[in-house]
Amino acid sequence: MKVFAVVNAAGGVGKTTTATTLAVGLSRLLQGRRVLLIDLDPQGDSASTMLGLRTQGFCVSKVIDGRSYVTNGQLDLKAAYQANILSADRSEEGIHRPNLYVLPSSDRIKDAKTSMIEEVANRVRELLAKGNHDYASFPTIAKLFTERLNPLRNIFDVIILDCPPSSDAFEDAIFAFADIIISPTMLDYKSLRATLLLMNRVTKAQQNDGVHCRVKYMVPTFVDLRTKLAQSMLASLEERYGAYLTISTPVPRTISVAEGPASGGLTILEYQEGSGSTSPAAEAAVQAYWDLINYVYDDLNIPETAYV
Ligand SMILES: Nc1ncnc2c1ncn2[C@@H]1O[C@H](COP(=O)(O)OP(=O)(O)OP(=O)(O)O)[C@@H](O)[C@H]1O
Ligand SMILES: [Mg+2]
């Protein structure tokens, strides 16, 4: 079981597109297993716009801020999961996603963050009042976040996090929960710099907080493969980062990727199958995403099924 976080502090670089496409692709490869996509972005695009689901008020904020599911002073996480995780299957419309589940987001996640900060402060005050000065054992946002989400590791075979375009205190929580980071990046100065800064922050978190996650994949997005600039940028990326991480197949800029969500919430994989388009850029985008899906599948080390 592994948790993959799709992260880049730069906005609009293809994080949600990558997270949802990866989730759909993996759920197809992992027949009979369960894939969970967790949206952590207050924009809440993953479930509704990208996958065409009605979220019915379901929200990850209700899981990380457990106040709604406390009975007799105890947080009932099972109830919180049951009330907020929805199936992504749309088989009745011909879109088959039988083993994909989503924990959606909404702008309530901002309030959940504030409530987590208050909860951590209250717990710290209580410990100090009891004379406890073992600071290393004190609660943190990252510890609280993993406490609320870690049990999902026992329920799902793979978890994918769609992260917001920011690097706030919540990011440490994402680093603490995730095993592997995937960073989609455009081949421009701003988003490449954001990926470089992300790698630095992860290294610091490994050194200071003992987190074990690492940036393993960079996914070049919105690439115009016909230009010499894109080719030379890709070559220098490989030269600079190739020893530390895998630079996945570049995803071309193609309107088909944006048309899928606009056509009732389909990933490029599903949209291409339905449209029958033979645009080379759209086919290359599908292939690029399958390459990433296969890398991630290999990371899961799923034992081969023995047929007897
Ligand atoms: N390869 C592509 N070609 C063309 N359009 C794309 C491509 N990838 C993503 N898009 C479109 O670009 C827009 C931004 O993509 P997306 O929402 O995935 O980015 P993001 O990094 O999640 O954004 P944010 O930082 O706001 O969360 C969307 O409308 C999406 O459909
Ligand atoms: Mg997004």
Image: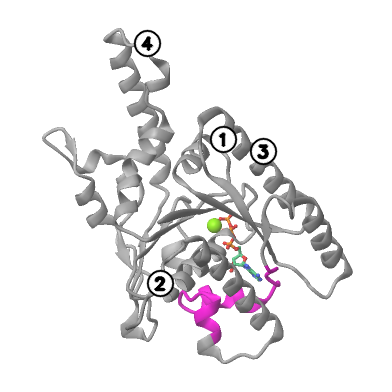
- The amino acid marked with disc number 1 is Gln
Q: Amino acid under label 2? A: Leu
Amino acid type, callout 4: His
Q: Residues within 10 Å of mark 3 (few under 14, many from 20)?
A: few
Circle 3: residue type: Asn
Vertical position of residue 172 compared to residue 263: above or below: above
Give the mark nearest the N terminus, 4 or 3.
Answer: 4
Q: Name the residue furthest left.
A: 72
Please tell me whether mark 1 sits on a helix, a strand or a loop: helix
Asked whether 264 or 51 is in front, the reply is 51
In the rendered structure, find residue 30 and report the number of the disc placed on it. Answer: 2
Q: Residue at x 65, y 50 (%)?
A: 10
Residue 269: within the magenta? yes
Looking at marks 2 and 4 on the same chain, the residue that comes earlier in the sequence is marked by 2
Q: CA distance from mark 1 to mark 2?
A: 30 Å
Percent coordinates x, y for residue 192 in the rendering: 73, 51
In this rendering, the answer to whether 114 lies above or below 81 is above
What range is drawn magenta here? Answer: 249-272
Kindly identify which numbered label has been placed on residue 200.
3
State if disc 3 and disc 4 touch (CB < 8 Å): no
Question: Disc 1 marks which residue?
Answer: 206
Q: Earlier in the sequence, mark 3 or mark 1?
A: 3
